């Protein structure tokens, strides 16, 4: 009996593997898989990059999703596709992606088109934040009680007292100001020059002499590996088209024994935040963030949820083992 069960389980898994191999054995679908390994994309973005009609792309995606190679998820009226992370087909996807030739002309073109989509979005984000820098208040703008979030963060950092803090997407530098008394030195990084100008003025006014800010991109932090004892991402991740890539980059700069703290919205249905405030993701589920943190070799702590009248904020934190950890680039992720 046990043998029969084992054999049927194996049979099922071989069938699944064969289905996945059949699904990916087509040039456009292999390209799509490679693109989905580089972020979370809507069908219209994938149509743009692949230069194929929407119905064709949708059909390819359906086959890849049914085979368990890509993951489809809906958030409000948007549907995203990304590389699957768990299960045998996901392992197959990772293996295939590693085997893709670096120099292939078509894949190179896809990468360039993807970079152009990203760059256009980056410019939009930059000008949006430049235009809002003077009156930015993340929590107030979202109708969330900022004082409660600050109190939780302060409690955590008063306990931790890290020697150094990197605040990614620092905006007007509010988190630096709040945490300055509890950290050795702190650096804020942001893409928007106007936000940084406001942050500098704020830090100057508050005499936060242990804090400074610098221009940089959260996907490529201008920071050496393992150089910060704590990294915060406060109300930033929902703007990312590849949240996992942002977390990997944050992880890269974390010292052994360090702490990564993500504060963002819990999953919600307020679609208007996309049109009005340029959010890309409608918050995050605990299992999604914790899955990413675990994949990066971090140990997540229980999340702290602060419910507001319309939206909830969650503080997810995770620690890095004190022994020398593997770096993000060493962690098997994709062939991207
Ligand atoms: C909602 S604001 C949050 C600012 C700050 N963390 C706070 O909570 O007050 C998001 C910030 O992320 C920054 N940002 C967006 N995309 C970025 C990127 N690719 N690299 C660095 N910063 C980015 C924006 O310029 C903006 O200042």
Image (cartoon, grey):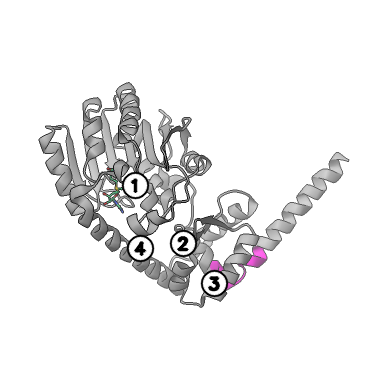
Residue that mark 2 sits on? 41
Residue that mark 3 sits on? 57
Q: Considering only order in the chain, which callout, 3 or 1, is on the residue closer to the N terminus?
A: 3
Question: What secondary structure is found at the residue carrying circle 3?
Answer: helix
The magenta region covers: 21-30
Give the quarter of the image for residue 212: top left
On the question of residue 241 being in view, the answer is no
Q: Considering only order in the chain, which callout, 3 or 2, is on the residue closer to the N terminus?
A: 2
Question: Mark 1 packing: few (<14 Cα in 10 Å), some, or many (20+)?
Answer: many
Question: What secondary structure is found at the residue carrying circle 4?
Answer: helix
Q: Considering only order in the chain, which callout, 4 or 3, is on the residue closer to the N terminus?
A: 3
Name the outermost residue toward the right.
Answer: 1
Quarter placement of the C terminus: bottom left
Point out which mark residue 118 bears.
4
Q: Front-most of 189 and 12?
A: 189
Mark 1–mark 4 contact, CB under 8 Å? no
Distance of mark 4 from mark 2, alpha carbons? 11 Å
Question: Mark 2 packing: few (<14 Cα in 10 Å), some, or many (20+)?
Answer: many
> Would you place residue 261 above or below residue 125 in this image?
above
Q: Is residue 302 shown left or right of residue 204?
A: right
Residue 246, position in %: x, y?
38, 48
Q: Considering only order in the chain, which callout, 2 or 4, is on the residue closer to the N terminus?
A: 2
């Amino acid at each position: 009996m046990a043998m029969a069960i084992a054999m049927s389980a194996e049979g099922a898994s071989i069938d699944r593997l064969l289905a996945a191999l059949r699904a990916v054995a087509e040039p456009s679908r292999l390209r799509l898989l490679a693109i989905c390994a580089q972020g979370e994309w809507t069908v219209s973005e994938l149509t743009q990059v692949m230069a194929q009609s929407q119905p064709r792309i949708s059909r390819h995606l359906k086959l890849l999703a049914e085979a368990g190679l890509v993951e489809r998820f809906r958030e409000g009226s948007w549907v995203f596709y990304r590389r699957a992370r768990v299960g045998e087909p996901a392992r197959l996807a990772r293996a295939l992606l590693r085997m893709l030739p670096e120099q292939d002309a078509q894949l190179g073109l896809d990468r360039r088109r993807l970079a152009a989509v990203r760059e256009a979005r980056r410019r939009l984000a930059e000008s949006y934040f430049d235009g809002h820098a003077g009156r930015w208040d993340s929590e107030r703008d979202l109708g969330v009680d900022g004082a409660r979030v600050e109190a939780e963060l302060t409690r955590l950092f008063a306990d931790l007292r890290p020697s150094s803090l990197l605040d990614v997407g620092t905006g007007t530098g509010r988190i630096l100001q709040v945490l300055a008394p509890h950290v050795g030195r702190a650096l804020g990084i942001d893409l928007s020059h106007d936000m940084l100008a406001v942050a500098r003025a704020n830090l100057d006014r508050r005499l936060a002499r242990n804090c400074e800010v610098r221009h940089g991109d959260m996907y490529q932090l201008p920071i050496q590996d393992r150089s910060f004892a704590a990294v915060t991402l406060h109300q930033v991740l929902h703007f990312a088209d590849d949240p996992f890539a942002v977390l990997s980059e944050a992880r890269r700069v974390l010292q052994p024994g360090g702490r990564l703290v993500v504060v963002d919205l819990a999953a919600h249905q307020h679609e208007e935040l996309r049109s009005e405030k340029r959010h890309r993701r409608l918050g995050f589920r605990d299992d999604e963030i914790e899955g990413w943190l675990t994949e990066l070799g971090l140990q997540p702590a229980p999340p702290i949820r602060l419910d507001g009248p319309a939206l909830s904020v969650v503080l997810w934190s995770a620690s890095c083992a004190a022994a020398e950890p593997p770096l993000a680039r060493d962690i098997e992720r994709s062939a991207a």
